[in-house]
């Protein structure tokens, strides 16, 4: 199987594919993930796919369009692929780092915060800076989670609050997948997951974006907290890019635990949406999944603090009430029933 990368549809350039998929690839062991593996897999740029189809007497653009129509039948391509490679399998380990504030009244019920601590390591083929520091993606999220933990520690919470810095997000969300398969609580007792992946460093905003808006009651919690900050909640305006499926919260959703993935909105206090989109585009083009994602002393932390306060308020509310957020009618997920819960020793 070969994935055809399109910058517009994916929301990131071909260089992100090169940086993330060159070199060793990771997966959970078959004992954790028994699904069969492909014999061969890779990526093609859109230009390469267009040339390949043309050389076989086919038109990639028209076939792609026809594949969007119900009833589409696969079309054999007049081309052959010869693959020869030598691969080795090595075993390694990487850690999820998990901390907990035990609940004072209902310690068997838990609110989770997640943020991934990994990135892409080092690329010695590059000249100059070779290290993928991941300062924004996602050292900002881990730092925010630690600050929220410190704030929640200052007073008792009725429910337990778990803080999980998970690994291997950039390699297929593997750390959170493992965590969800080995939850220290019964799955039906996990109230929700609040995921923090990249904080905005371009100043405060008037809006908050809910990735996957409309799926669960977590939107209602987000709107209530945003209202206290005089901010509005807006849906992700580019859902076709699949952001809801590209961070660690999705593994919680897949087992039925409502998850919140929110980010600072584009409507900046200083400069409005034009400034917000310019900052977002600059980050995607020049720093996302590149060694240039380094600390910058010129960062504007006001928006990051604004978002931390927002996510803190949501977690504090969840940790001190007795209800459980539910999925909306028609959502793609459903809360786990008690009989389906997985348990393991904390």
Image (spheres, helix red, strand yellow):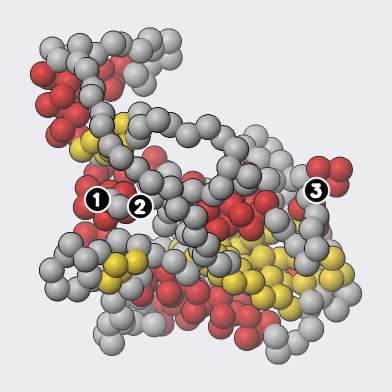
Labelled pair 1, 2 in contact (Cβ < 8 Å): no
Q: Position of residue 13 (x, y in %)?
A: 23, 50
Give the residue displayed 85% in from the left and 47% down from the top: 338
Q: State the CA–CA distance, disc 1 to disc 3.
A: 39 Å
Sooner in the amino-acid sequence: mark 1 or mark 2: 1
Give the residue displayed 23% in from the left and 36% down from the top: 44
| Residue 230 position (above or below residue 85) | below
Q: Position of residue 255 (x, y in %)?
A: 68, 45
Left or right: 271 as drawn, with respect to 229: left
For label 1, the SS is helix
Q: Position of residue 41 (x, y in %)?
A: 35, 34
In the picture of the structure, the residue carrying the numbered disc 3 is 341
Q: State the CA–CA distance, disc 2 to disc 3.
A: 34 Å
Looking at the picture, tell me which residue is in the foreground, 336 or 131.
Answer: 131
Q: State the CA–CA distance, disc 1 to disc 2.
A: 12 Å
On residue 24, the disc is: 2
Q: Position of residue 294 (x, y in %)?
A: 28, 76
On residue 18, the disc is: 1
Looking at the picture, tell me which residue is in the foreground, 290 or 121.
Answer: 121
The N terminus appears in which quarter of the rendering? top left
Looking at the picture, tell me which residue is in the foreground, 310 or 244.
Answer: 244
Sooner in the amino-acid sequence: mark 2 or mark 3: 2
The C terminus appears in which quarter of the rendering? bottom right
């Amino acid at each position: 199987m070969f994935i055809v990368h399109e910058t517009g549809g994916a929301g990131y350039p071909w260089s992100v594919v090169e940086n993330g998929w060159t070199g060793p690839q990771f997966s959970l062991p078959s004992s954790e993930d028994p699904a069969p593996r492909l014999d061969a897999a890779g990526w093609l740029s859109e230009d390469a796919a267009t040339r390949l189809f043309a050389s076989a007497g086919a038109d990639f653009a028209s076939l792609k369009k026809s594949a969007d129509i119900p009833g589409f039948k696969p079309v054999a391509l007049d081309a052959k692929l010869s693959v020869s490679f030598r691969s080795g399998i090595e075993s390694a380990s990487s850690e999820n780092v998990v901390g907990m504030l035990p609940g004072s009244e209902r310690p068997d019920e838990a609110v989770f915060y997640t943020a991934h601590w990994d990135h892409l390591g080092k690329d010695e083929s590059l000249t100059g800076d070779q290290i993928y520091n991941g300062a924004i993606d996602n050292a900002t999220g881990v730092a925010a989670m630690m600050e929220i933990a410190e704030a929640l520690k200052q007073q008792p919470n009725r429910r337990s609050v778990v803080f999980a810095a998970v690994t291997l997000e950039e390699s297929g969300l593997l750390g959170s997948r493992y965590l969800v398969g080995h939850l220290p609580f019964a799955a039906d007792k996990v109230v929700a997951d609040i995921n923090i992946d990249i904080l905005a460093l371009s100043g405060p905003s008037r809006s908050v974006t809910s990735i996957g808006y409309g799926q669960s009651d977590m939107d209602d919690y987000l709107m209530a907290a945003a209202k206290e900050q005089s901010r509005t909640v807006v849906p992700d305006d580019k859902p076709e890019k699949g952001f809801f499926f590209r961070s660690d919260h999705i593994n919680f959703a897949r087992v039925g635990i409502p998850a919140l993935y929110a980010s600072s909105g584009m409507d900046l206090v200083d400069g409005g949406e034009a400034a917000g989109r310019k900052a977002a585009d600059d980050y995607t083009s020049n720093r996302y999944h590149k060694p240039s994602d380094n600390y910058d002393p010129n960062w504007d932390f006001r928006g990051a603090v604004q978002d931390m306060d927002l996510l803190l308020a949501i977690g504090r509310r969840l940790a001190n009430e007795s209800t459980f957020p539910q999925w909306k009618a028609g959502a793609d997920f459903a809360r786990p029933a008690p009989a389906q819960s997985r348990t393991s020793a904390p």
